[in-house]
């Protein structure tokens, strides 16, 4: 693809990070491989090959598939027929993260640990349909993570782009925040991601998961005692704009 570790384009140890950077795979999929959380199967190697073929070369002149077509490895028509040319870039998602049996809205289906059903509820204002997702957080291979846009407090992005980049089976828009209006886009309540406490505003209901998958809902009070030199003071919020 034109990348040379000898020229400093990337390092072998961080090659998956480079793949994420150029859009060849999702961050979540790279983490699955780096942490040896899941095995790589034949279907993963096929999907990785497709992703590589639809990814632009280092110089941006063409995709790998287009470059091979120019060299006569296969014809342009064959490349288009297989979706390798003209169909846009395919970002690899690990097979364990794919919901290959996603049900249609009017159907219900179960894939074992994750199931989805569409139900209709009667309200005083009329009926409303809702997708009900059930997840067995104790099942092997199931993990639940809290994530932020660009790993940054106050950042936002269209929900569709968050979904497409995640590689997850199920995504829920969590903390309330005024993400698409005004300047303040900070969340309401506590935020903890990957075991790190990032944001705290006490007195508000929080929804959390332990490392083992247990679920807790409550209002954990957080109290900070800060010392600086001889001075010390108390506060009830962390990384909050107020």
Image (cartoon, rainbow, N blue to C red):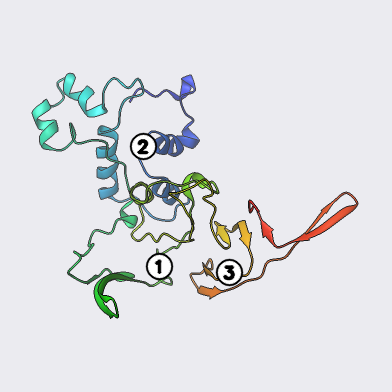
Q: What kind of element bears circle 3? A: loop
Say whether marks 3 and 1 touch (CB < 8 Å).
Answer: no
Q: CA distance from mark 2 to mark 1?
A: 28 Å
The part of the image, by quadrant, that contains residue 204 is bottom right
Where the C terminus falls, by quadrant? Answer: bottom right
Q: Closer to the observer: label 3 or label 1?
A: 3
Please rate how many residues cluster around mark 2, counting C-alpha atoms within 10 Å: few if below 14, some from 14 to 19, many from 20: some
Q: Which mark is residue 23?
A: 2
Residue at the image point whose x is 29% and y is 19% from the top: 61
Secondary-structure class at tag 1:
loop
- Read off the residue under disc 3: 204
Q: Is residue 150 left or right of residue 60?
A: right
Q: Residue 145: x and y, percent?
A: 47, 59
Which residue position is annotated with label 1?
Answer: 140
Q: CA distance from mark 2 to mark 3?
A: 37 Å
Above-or-below relation of 7 to 92: above
């Amino acid at each position: 693809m034109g990348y040379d570790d000898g020229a400093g384009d990337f390092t072998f140890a961080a090659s998956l990070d480079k793949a994420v950077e150029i859009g060849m795979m999702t961050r979540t999929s790279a983490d699955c491989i780096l942490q040896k959380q899941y095995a790589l199967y034949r279907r993963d190697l096929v999907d990785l090959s497709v992703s590589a073929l639809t990814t632009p070369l280092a110089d941006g002149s063409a995709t790998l598939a287009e470059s091979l077509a120019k060299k006569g490895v296969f014809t342009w028509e064959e490349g288009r027929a297989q979706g390798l040319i003209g169909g846009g870039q395919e970002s690899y998602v690990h097979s364990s993260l794919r919901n290959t049996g996603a049900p249609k809205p009017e159907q219900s289906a179960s894939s074992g640990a994750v199931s989805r059903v569409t139900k209709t509820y009667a309200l005083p204002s009329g009926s409303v349909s809702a997708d009900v997702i059930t997840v067995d957080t104790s099942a092997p291979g199931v993990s639940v993570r809290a994530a932020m846009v660009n790993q940054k407090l106050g950042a936002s992005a269209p929900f569709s782009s968050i979904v497409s980049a995640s590689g997850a089976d199920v995504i829920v828009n969590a903390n309330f925040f005024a993400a698409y209006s005004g300047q303040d886009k900070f969340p309401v309540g506590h935020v903890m991601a990957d075991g790190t406490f990032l944001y705290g505003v006490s007195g508000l209901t929080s929804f959390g998961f332990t490392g083992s998958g247990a679920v807790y809902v409550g209002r954990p009070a957080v109290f900070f005692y800060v010392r600086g030199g001889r001075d010390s003071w108390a506060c009830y919020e962390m990384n909050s704009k107020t």
